[in-house]
Image: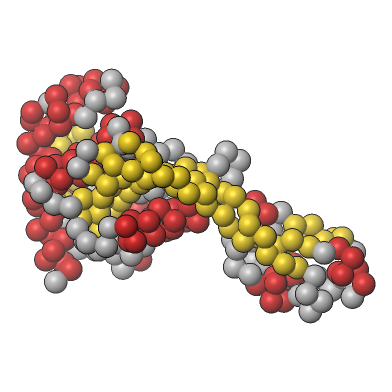
Amino acid sequence: MRIAVASGKGGAGKTTIATSLAVIAAERGLTTTFLDCDVEEPNGHLFLHPALCQKQVVNVPVPQLDEKTCRDHGVCGRCGQACHFSAIVCLGDVVVVNPDLCHGCGACILACPANALKEVPHRTGVVESGQAGALRFAQGLLDVGQAMASPVIRRVKEWGAQEVPAGLTIVDAPPGTACPTVEAVRGSDFVLLVVEATPFGLHDAALAADTLEALGVRAAAVLNRVDRFVEAGRGITEFGGAILRGTMPVLARIPADRQVAEAYARGQMPIGVVPRFRQAMERLLTRLLEVARREAA
């Protein structure tokens, strides 16, 4: 089973909860894999301390132009018309290729009648893998200056599927609702949406909940860092249409706890130093697996 842990915004506590659930699942004897797909800023390794023994470069096939062949046949501009991402722009008789915008779809190659384009590899990032105690671990790291996170995320997920075909996989997804998040949760059996119990967190969680619903992904929510002032507010269970319609259950409300924040700031796993937080994560994992298995049945 693959469970993605997502959030509407950064700083909601997604990685803290994802790493905690993975560690507890491994302690229970489940074959568990942790995939850090937040490739622009992976930080699961700061808490799990994996021994990384393998590294794979992630390349995207991008077009390379043979200018002489293009000019000899007359610049037609069909490659630029075929590209929906402006990776190829035709300015009169000049064809400009920007590999950083290329999605590697190959449409320009098919569209060129002169065969003046060929695909060459363009590096976008790396995937590092290894072992973190009983956990199998992999993370993606997008190269500085690269805009395309999805190819790196796909490679991390492919590693998880090939190396660990069975057992429980926890995917730490990027925050938000953009393409990287969609790619990370795609193919998951279930998604746990971590909601920061603040006005900004509730607003962004509404967008994330609607996105997951539009994707047809089964999901449940956990409200994180809930204090008595937020609990008293009307918005706590009204952050998204999915919850109002009863299609996204709230599995847990995690109280705001200064000790958890202090442990996080020291780079410690809160489940190792705050007993009440460990108990909350154990209950959450039990409930999450029950709901996910029931929904997948």
Q: Position of residue 170 (x, y in %)?
A: 26, 50
Taking 131 as reference, is 237 left or right?
left
Res 36 seen here: no
Q: Quadrant of the C terminus?
A: bottom left
Q: Position of residue 5 (x, y in %)?
A: 28, 49
Taking 80 as reference, is 25 left or right?
left
Q: Position of residue 176 (x, y in %)?
A: 40, 48
Outermost residue, front direction? 53
Of residue 103 and residue 56, the one placed in the foreground of this image is: 56
Res 96 seen here: yes
Outermost residue, bottom direction? 113
Q: Quadrant of the N terminus?
A: bottom left
Q: Is residue 278 positioned above or below 134 on the image?
A: above
Q: Is residue 203 positioned above or below 103 on the image?
A: above
Q: Quadrant of residue 54?
A: top left
Q: Is residue 26 positioned above or below 209 on the image?
A: above
Q: Is residue 21 positioned above or below 107 on the image?
A: above
Of residue 16 and residue 251, the one placed in the foreground of this image is: 16
How does the figure colour the protein chain or chains? Answer: secondary structure
Q: Position of residue 285 (x, y in %)?
A: 12, 48
Outermost residue, right direction? 72
Determine the residue positioned at 86% across, 69% down: 70
